[in-house]
Image: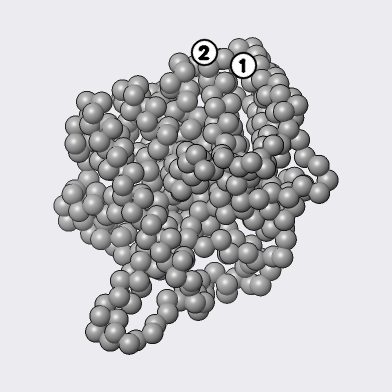
Amino acid sequence: MNKRITAGLLGYLTLFTGAAMLPSFFLAAFSEEVGGAAAFLLSIFICIAVTFELERFGGLKGRDNIGVRDGIAITGLGWFLVSVLGTIPYLAGGYLNLVDSLVESFAGFSGTGATVFDDVEILPKSILLWRSVSNWIGGLGIVVIFMALLSQFGRGAMFILRAETTGPTKDRQMPRIRDNAKAIFKIYVGLTAICAGSYFLCGLNPFASINHAMTTIATGGYGIYNSTVREYGNFYLEYCMSFFMIISSGSFAMYAVAARQGIGVIFRNTEFKIYLQIIFFATVMVSADLFFEMHMEIETAVRSAVFHVASLSSTTGFVADDFDTYPPISKAFFLMMMFLGGCAGSTAGGLKVARIILLFKFVALIVRQKIHPQLINQIKLNGQIIDENVVYGAAKFFFAVVAMDILFAFVMMFDGIDFVNSISVSVSTMASVGPGFGIQGATSTYDLLPDFSKISACIFMFLSRLEVFSVLVLFTPSFWNNPKGW
């Protein structure tokens, strides 16, 4: 690993973090929030100070190229550093203590959207905006957005893109990696603007529209009201939010290709088609369950099912009703949708539909080979042959997620939380959803967790956002033992 290059790019990332705080600072200053303006000003100065230290420690030169170790280190350390710096506005403003500030920042940047605030409506608008901005930046990826805005990455940019983007494959739609990042970023900004405009037409005020749009497209789920979405009294808004949550669960790289080659690209994508089929099936089953077991009116049952299936499968975590009170069959479908997640290359968390498809095809292939040992077969996705290393990678990731779910559950049980609640919080956190069942129910917050479990949640949110292996490799001695590093 080239420490000089790594330090130089980390310096740029911290400066980028300070720049991301400027809208909140200006809002606080304009709204005469003296404490909020001072907190953000201090946060920005600290980001600048860290940038100067990192740039003094390292820096970039004209012909620098990023290697695989550099890309992993920049992504892992950069994500961690930005999340830590993101705690400063909460601390400096006196809104949260250190542990809760870490939880709020890590949940924001990881797209989990879990909160420790019991009453967000008493918070100043500048803090509400910062929560949404952290969601939005973390949704697409801190380093991916940074890459789209900065030109000096060289040939090694692919390693950074691989380290932070989610899913079993990292498709490349354009010859230059930065062009890919820019195209995806433009789609991301465009969808956010369209979403904000749609929410405004549905009746939300401009500030609420912008905040909810950022956290919807990022599938983070931070809101600016304590009430559930249904309490807004606007069923048009519920359907509108459901639509954008589902859209955000699709691959943004796929949308970038569709922008150039036509909308047919979307309807030919195997993963997205299967994802929509899963959404439809789960919606039908939950609607029927709510209609027959809870005796809801048919339209209300369908609307609740559509909204919560979209919210939990996209791992956004918006809530229209206390789904913790729903019948067991509905909750079973919700838990399944949390675990499954959205599509590869989306802002959604979870396992990703592409991995599930590959694993099912892999199992079917093994069964066929047991019957016909001489049979040579290949696994395809979207008409392309998938390399066996990608398939094995999906299996390894599945094992890693299950193992981390179990480990986090044991950590919380050790901290005094009962078995059922531990499993619920673990699945919800590792899937980057936020709300779950029991102690972390639809209308609850992470404030109920003990401090040790909160710190553990930060670690597991970090692991989940970077899909486990990009973080674990940082803890191997061989990663750092590089004689050519400095």
Residue 472 position within the rendered picture, expressed as x and y whole percent measured from the top left = 45, 43
Q: How is the image coloured?
A: one colour
Q: In the rendered image, which residue does mark 2 sit on?
A: 94
Residue sitting at 69 percent across and 49 percent down?
66
How crowded is the residue under tag 2: few (<14 C-alpha within 10 Å), some, or many (20+)?
some
Q: In the rendered image, which residue does mark 1 sit on?
A: 39
Q: Residue 143's image quarter?
A: top right
Residue sitting at 36 percent across and 56 percent down?
398
Q: Residue 450's image quarter?
A: top left
Q: Nearer the viewer, residue 209 or 449?
A: 449
Q: Residue 418's image quarter?
A: top left
Going by the image, does 414 lie left or right of 145? left
Residue 427 shows up from this direction: no
Residue sitting at 38 percent across and 23 percent down?
118
- Helix, strand or loop status at disc 1: helix
Residue 91 position within the rendered picture, expressed as x and y whole percent measured from the top left = 53, 17
- Callout 2–callout 1 Cβ contact below 8 Å: yes
Q: Quadrant of the C terminus?
A: top right
Residue 480 position within the rendered picture, expressed as x and y whole percent measured from the top left = 56, 39
Going by the image, does 215 lie left or right of 22? left
Give, as a three-letter code, the residue at label 1.
Ala
Residue sitting at 46 percent across and 34 percent down?
107
How crowded is the residue under tag 1: few (<14 C-alpha within 10 Å), some, or many (20+)?
many
> In this rendering, is residue 381 above or below 185?
below
Q: Nearer the viewer, residue 103 or 477?
A: 477
Give, as a three-letter code, the residue at label 2.
Gly
Going by the image, does 194 lie left or right of 321? right
> In this rendering, is residue 145 above or below 337?
above
Residue 289 shows up from this direction: yes
> In this rendering, is residue 428 above or below 266?
above
Residue 354 position within the rendered picture, expressed as x and y whole percent measured from the top left = 43, 64
